[in-house]
Amino acid sequence: MPSFQSHRVAQILEERDGFQRMKLEDGSKAYALPAVVGAVEVGDVVVVNTTAVDLGLGTGGWHVVHSVGHRTEWTTPGVGHLLKARYLSEQLQVDPHISERVDLVGARVLLCVLHSHLGAVSIALKSSDLGYLMTDQAALPLKLSDLVAQLQAKNLLKCTVTAGQAFGGDIEAVSVASGTAALLDNGCPRIVLAAGPGHAGTSSNFGFSAMELAGHAAVLTALGAKVGLCVRASGTDERQRHQGISHHARTILGAIPVPIDVPLPLDGDDSWVVSSGHHPCRIEPINVSAVIAESEIEVTSMGRPIAEDPVACAHLGAAAAWLGKPN
């Protein structure tokens, strides 16, 4: 069950488009989504959802503003006929992109297991036509992502689309397929498909957020897109299931019923890809560690800098190089 508390706002710590961070009078911290609850000001009494902090989950110790106490009425003018976050008290009105496309030919889609992989790939690719398609398997609000805000500030993402129940992208979409069509319609043939912050895992074979990628791979391939999997790999992760090639990559590939590309560094073992019925693509990787350092954008996974993991960087660099190839 969710847990709530009421506190007065002592200080606004950060504000950017669609997002606020604040310090509360008891010393705790919270964030707010003005599109959902309205803008928050110093002195406001806010009701915050404390559940994630109470459970010690990976929110960085931030409560979530549920409502602003003194308001008896509040509205944001909206357009469109579709609701996202449907049937929650925070449901909001959006206008989804409608495309006339009958296929997705021309799209090159890189499936990424972790949100942080979006950062590494985008920084390495430095493309003027890269789009981010965010699914609804982790955080629903795109504005929560500090990483996306930094990438957009440096013009490393041309367009963002939020699909399913996710919201807050430059464009709203009902499904991953219609989101891919939206990016093609807006001049983004190179696409990173990944959930937002907050990937969930259960230390079990199938209980992790990125398992969704298997289904997306099948649909996108059937509609004519070129699809590749960004391999999750690590040389520094102490958990056995993620050492070397993560079980996530192996499990996802095993569940995809159609052959897709799997970018690998030139010296990478491809036997596990071949045995799963997919296409290994050996390619010279981009130097991810170097380009991240040059970008001055912090890209971390499980609290660790990705740039300090050579195994992860080699596979991310190969994935970025694959995404940059012409169709």
Image (tube, rainbow, N blue to C red):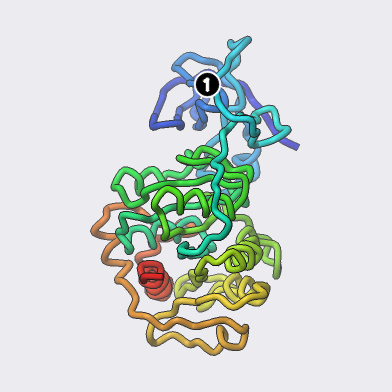
Q: Position of residue 83 (x, y in %)?
A: 65, 33
Looking at the image, which residue is at 37% across and 80% down? Answer: 283
Count the marks.
1
Q: Position of residue 59 (x, y in %)?
A: 54, 44
Looking at the image, which residue is at 39% across and 62% down? Answer: 121
**Which residue is at the front of the view, 148 or 304?**
148
Residue 163 higher or lower than 284, as above or below: above
Residue 52 higher or lower than 233, as above or below: above
| Extreme residue toward the left, this view | 294
Q: Is residue 316 left or right of residue 167?
A: left
Quarter that holds the N terminus: top right
**Which residue is at the front of the view, 312 or 63?**
312
In this rendering, does residue 232 appear at all?
no
Q: Which residue is mark 1?
A: 38
Q: Is residue 125 left or right of residue 181?
A: left
Residue 194 higher or lower than 19, as above or below: below
* Mark 1 residue element: loop
| Extreme residue toward the right, this view | 1
Looking at the image, which residue is at 33% across and 63% down? Answer: 125
Quarter that holds the C terminus: bottom left
In this rendering, does residue 32 appear at all?
yes
The amino acid type, in three-letter code, at marker 1 is Gly
Looking at the image, which residue is at 57% across and 17% down? Answer: 75
Q: Position of residue 291 (x, y in %)?
A: 27, 63
Q: Position of residue 195 (x, y in %)?
A: 55, 53
Q: Is residue 228 left or right of residue 202?
A: left
**Label 1 environment density (alpha carbons within 10 Å; few <14, some 14–19, many ≥20):** some
Which quarter of the picture shows residue 184? bottom left
